[in-house]
Each structure stands twice: as C-alpha cells, then as structure tokens.
Amino acid sequence: MEMSSRLAFPMAFFLVLLLVWVNEVCGESNTFNVKDFGAIADGETDNSKALLNAWSKACQEKDQGTVLIPSGTFMVKAITLQGPCNDQTAFQIDGVLQAPSDPSFGTDHWINFKSINGLKVHGNGKLDGQGALAWSQTTCGGNADCKIPPVISAPGNSRNTDGIHVSKSKNIQILNSSIATGDDCISIGPGNTIISIYGISCGPGHGISIGSLGRYPDEKNVDGICVRNCTFNNTSNGLRIKTWAPSPPSKVTGVTFQDIVMYNTGNPIIIDQQYCPAKPCSAK
C-alpha cells in the first residue's frame, strides 16, 4: 500500500506535465509572430514574405488574430495586407518596421492595409520609412522641371505628409501614439464611420482634421468620429473640419471632441468651408 502511494504521485505529476505539453503543442494561439514565419531582425533581409504569411494566418482567425512585430529591426518592401478577414485583426508593432534604403521605391505606398473591417494597430514600436534618404535626390527647391522622389515617412520637418490618413473605413482605432509631421497628424477622409482616436500627442503639425471633403462628386458621408484625451503642441490647428468650395452635398455627423489639451496652437477648433491649399481655387 505504501509503495503504490509512492508510485501514484510521480504518475499523477507526469500526467499533469504531459497535459501541459499537449496543450502547448496542440493549442492554437491567435498571435502570429513574424519570426515564426522566417523573419530576420537584421535591418537588411527582406521580410515581406514572412509578414504576408503571418498576416494570412491572422486574417483567417475567427477570434481576432494578431500579427506581432517583436523587438528588432525588420526590413519589408512594398506590401499590401489584404482583407476581408474573418474577424477584427490586430497589428502589434513592438519593434521597427523599416522600408528599403533604395530611394527608387517604385510604388505609391509602402504598407497598405486593404479591405479591412475593424483593424487595430498598436504597440511601442516604430515605422521607419527612411524618407530622408530621398531628400538629397531632389532638386525641386530650384528646378521647376524636377522629378519628385518618393517620400514615405512623415517626420516633423517634412511638408505635405500626413502622419496617418484614414479613407473609406469603418471601426478604426488609433491609440496612444506620438505624431510629428509637416501636415495633418491624422486626417480623416470621406466615407469613414466609427473612428476612435484616443491618447494622441500631435505636434508639430496641422492637427487632427476631418477632410478635406467635397473635392470630388459622390463622396460618402463621415459619421461617428470620436477624438478624446489628445494633446496638441506647436500645431497650426487643433481640431479641424475642412471642405472645398464649391462642393457637392455631403454630411459630417456624430463628431465628439473631449478632454483635449493644447499648447501654442494657432486655431484650436476650426471649421473651414473654403479650403484651398494651393490657389487659385474656384470658391464661390
């Protein structure tokens, strides 16, 4: 009896360990680390295929799949992360996603999220577009016939480069980010609904803008925009709605601005219905 008791405990302990091991091997995680798909964090290897494969797995999840960019620097070329997905999808950046160092980029985008409903981008990492490498390639400061090089990133001293632009999207959250740029920190174009912007530090820049709207016919309405707990520092505008004139009829509804702090902001709140960034404009 005493001997069987001594055997029973090791056997039970072994079974517990076995069950834990089986759960770890067979259990499915909703988080897909790009390293598990062959990504190498050396800043030189092209990790586009690894990112695409991780995205494909996360997109197929029925309970919010997450793509994880861990610590380290991962170079990826121009890429489109395509939907629709089976559920909301998260993109967690804890490392650095870096664009190629070649200024002849060859496309009009770097990382393109397409046909996604309910995308969440978060993390403590960084997107490094390496845009500064292209600035020395341009003579546009003194040559009207120059060829404008690609500009991919939006640092604080660049011009006409929105930090984040959202277009024709639904259920988007932009959270806890610091954005410095020469244009809008965040711009919300036509056709957007249920956009939540929380915990943003904006500046320098042109603020957070809804628009520009009304430049083209048949633009969709904008509804359900919530901007909360944001700070503006050294910005030309704070919160802005801008529309072209004349413009086809459209609506902006359900807008909430709450718990906003501004320092050295030119126009704290502005609604501009005569938006004209480059004259002449056909305003009436």
Image (cartoon, rainbow, N blue to C red):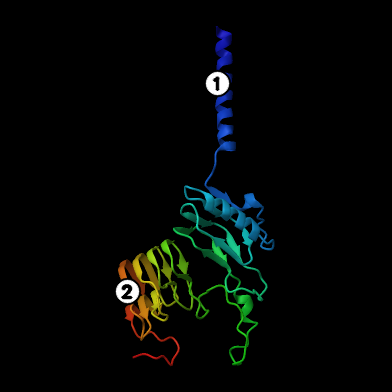
User: Which of marks 2 and 1 precedes in the sequence?
Assistant: 1
User: Which residue type does callout 2 highlight?
Assistant: Lys
Asked if residue 271 lies left or right of residue 180, the reply is left
Rendered location of residue 88, percent (x, y): 46, 54
Rendered location of residue 135, percent (x, y): 61, 80
- The residue positioned 54% from the left and 54% from the top of the image is 67
Q: Which residue is mark 1?
A: 12
- The residue positioned 55% from the left and 26% from the top of the image is 16
Residue 264 in view, yes or no: no
Mark 1 to mark 2 CA distance (whole Å): 67 Å
Q: Which residue is mark 2?
A: 251
Name the image quarter holding the C terminus.
bottom left
Question: Which of the 4 image quadrants contains residue 139?
Answer: bottom right
- Count of numbered badges drawn on the protein: 2
User: Which residue type does callout 1 highlight?
Assistant: Ala
- The residue positioned 41% from the left and 66% from the top of the image is 200
Q: Residues within 10 Å of mark 2 (few under 14, many from 20)?
A: few
* Between marks 1 and 2 in the image, the one whose residue lies nearer the viewer: 2
166 in relation to 33, above or below: below
Rendered location of residue 1, percent (x, y): 55, 6
Q: Front-most of 263 and 115?
A: 115
Asked if residue 64 lies left or right of residue 142, the reply is left
Residue 249 in view, yes or no: yes
Question: Which of the 4 image quadrants contains residue 3?
Answer: top right
Rendered location of residue 103, percent (x, y): 65, 76
232 in relation to 40, above or below: below
Q: Secondary structure at mark 1?
A: helix
Q: Secondary structure at mark 2?
A: loop
